[in-house]
Amino acid sequence: MTSLRLYHHPISTSSRPVMMFATEHRLQIDHQVVDLFSGEQHGPAFTAINPNQAVPVLEHGVFRLTESSAILKYLADLVESDAYPIDARERARVNEAMDWFNTGLSRELAYGFAYPQLFPNHARPGAEAQAAGLACVRPRAERLLSILDASMIGPDRRFVLGERITLADYLGLGIVTVGEAAGMDFTPWPNLRRWLSTMKARPAYAQTHAVFTGAFGHARTRNAMALTGEGAC
Ligand SMILES: N[C@@H](CCC(=O)N[C@@H](CS)C(=O)NCC(=O)O)C(=O)O
């Protein structure tokens, strides 16, 4: 097979799903860490690789691909993974759930709730604005997590779309775990907690999330900053 190279960072929300999928499928990949904390993604060398200055980026020979969702689908097709079914309607369900995670939940839980607390460059300017922003976004993230718990996973499903793991589980895990790392309390959502345990029990989770859990703590329950403010996000 033509060689595969993945530019990534081990704590990145968008990189971890690709790393976990690739590990579970025993893909031979040349892993290139892009040091997001020193700003390597903004340098000319990486900007030439991805003008968006973001990871992950996949190279398969001369073919270069950005966007975690597209990379997951490409890799799944490459190895004919069951995680991305061929049947049009089954595949559409996976796409639907992936879009839901990558647009809706990512916006509220990752960008709105988690990143401003975990990454200083995402923090809102000043303690008051930070508290007000979090107060605004928390109920929106919670509403989506309730939907994930009750309407998507529900009481009977092992994974987001049924008994079989799909790309939606890998992609969703990256987003849900960054919310957890920022102190979102998952107590109200038993189905979500069960799914999270199932995903974390997979051997590839420990392997691909060691740096992430080392950085942010494991199943941290600390509350985020005091949420006293009011106002628009
Ligand atoms: N929609 C993109 C998002 C990529 C993205 O934002 N990656 C982050 C890490 S999770 C990044 O590289 N950020 C660099 C920066 O903020 O400077 C995807 O799903 O791949």
Image: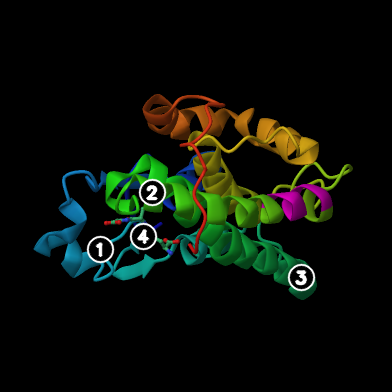
Tell me the CA gap for discs 4 and 1.
13 Å
Q: Taking 62 as reference, is 29 left or right?
A: right
Quarter of the figure with residue 49? bottom left
Disc 1: which residue: 53
The label on residue 128 is: 2
Quadrant assignment for the N terminus: bottom left
User: Which residues, given as a range, are shown in magenta?
Assistant: 145-150
Q: What's the residue at 24%, 48% (across, down)? A: 34
Tell me the CA gap for discs 1 and 2.
30 Å
Taking the image as four quarters, which one is ligand 1 found in?
bottom left
The label on residue 87 is: 3
Disc 4: which residue: 58
Tell me the CA gap for discs 3 and 4.
25 Å
- Secondary structure of the residue carrying tag 1 is loop
Asked if the residues shown at circle 4 and circle 1 are in contact, with their CB atoms under 8 angstroms apart, the answer is no
Number of marks present in the image shown: 4
